[in-house]
Image (tube, rainbow, N blue to C red):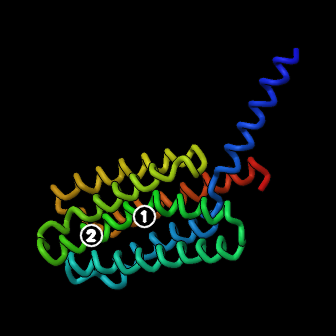
């Protein structure tokens, strides 16, 4: 009986430690707003300000993506530094270091394609989605377990966008809009469900 109690206590400790390892810097509402913004940009590109070229299409998405990354990253950075908790700051550093290489690779590849081989920019939407998938997979140890399905979604969507290159459809605004819009809304739902389940 004592052994069973000890095992149960150890299991409870493991569950508690696993819960404290989860990074809650990504707020569901913020992630949801990003998803909606992706759909809005797709609609604007499709009906209002139609990009005059493939390069302009890429630049518009790059600008919006950069603003979003800086806004979300800056907000998380500010809040965690303000908390004064060494544990939270260390946790934030781990998550940023996991996701950072994917973002950096996306910017480097984009710059190379734009300035050195602009004929390859047709592959950028698919490459961005796949790099985003790898970034999420990298952060998975610090996020709710279900977030892995979001990473798989981006991987599948990125593969689809690469296949659309053959049909000259990789620059469809809705391709990017649905990929990053639906992906972020899916992620927001998972983050929200995890917060409710853990009573946070």
Whether residue 27 can be seen here: no
Disc number at residue 168? none
Residue with the most extreme right position: 1
Residue at x-position 29% and y-position 51%: 160
Q: Is residue 40 left or right of residue 83?
A: left
Q: Is 198 rendered above or below residue 122?
A: above
Q: Residue 10: x, y in percent? A: 76, 30
Residue with the most extreme top position: 1
Q: Secondary structure at mark 2?
A: helix
Q: Residue 26: x, y in percent? A: 60, 63
Local crowd size for mark 2, using a 10 Å CA cut-off: few (<14), some (14–19), many (≥20): few
Q: Residue 169: x, y in percent? A: 22, 62
Location of mark 1 (residue)? 100
Q: Is residue 129 left or right of residue 14?
A: left
Local crowd size for mark 1, using a 10 Å CA cut-off: few (<14), some (14–19), many (≥20): some
Q: Nearer the viewer, residue 52 or 81?
A: 81
Q: Is 1 rendered above or below residue 19?
A: above
Q: Are marks 1 and 2 in contact (CB under 8 Å)?
A: no
Q: Is 135 rendered above or below residue 62?
A: above
Locate residue 106: give its quadrant. Answer: bottom left
Whether residue 37 can be seen here: yes
Location of mark 2 (residue)? 108
């Amino acid at each position: 009986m004592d052994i069973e109690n000890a095992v149960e206590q150890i299991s409870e400790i493991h569950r508690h430690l696993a819960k404290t390892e989860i990074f809650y810097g990504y707020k569901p509402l913020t992630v949801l707003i990003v998803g909606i913004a992706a759909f809005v940009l797709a609609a604007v590109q499709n009906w209002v300000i139609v990009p005059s070229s493939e390069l302009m299409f890429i630049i518009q998405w790059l600008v919006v993506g950069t603003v979003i990354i800086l806004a979300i990253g800056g907000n998380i950075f500010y809040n965690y530094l303000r908390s004064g908790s060494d544990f939270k700051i260390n946790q934030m550093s781990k998550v940023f270091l996991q996701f950072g290489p994917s973002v950096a690779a996306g910017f480097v590849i984009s710059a190379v394609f734009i300035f050195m081989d602009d004929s390859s920019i047709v592959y950028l939407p698919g490459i961005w989605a796949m790099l985003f998938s790898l970034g999420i997979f990298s952060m998975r140890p610090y996020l709710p377990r279900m977030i892995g399905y979001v990473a798989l979604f981006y991987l599948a969507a990125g593969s689809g966008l690469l296949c659309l290159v053959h049909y000259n459809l990789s620059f469809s605004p809705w391709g990017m809009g649905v990929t990053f819009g639906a992906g972020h809304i899916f992620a927001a739902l998972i983050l929200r469900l995890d917060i409710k389940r853990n009573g946070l």
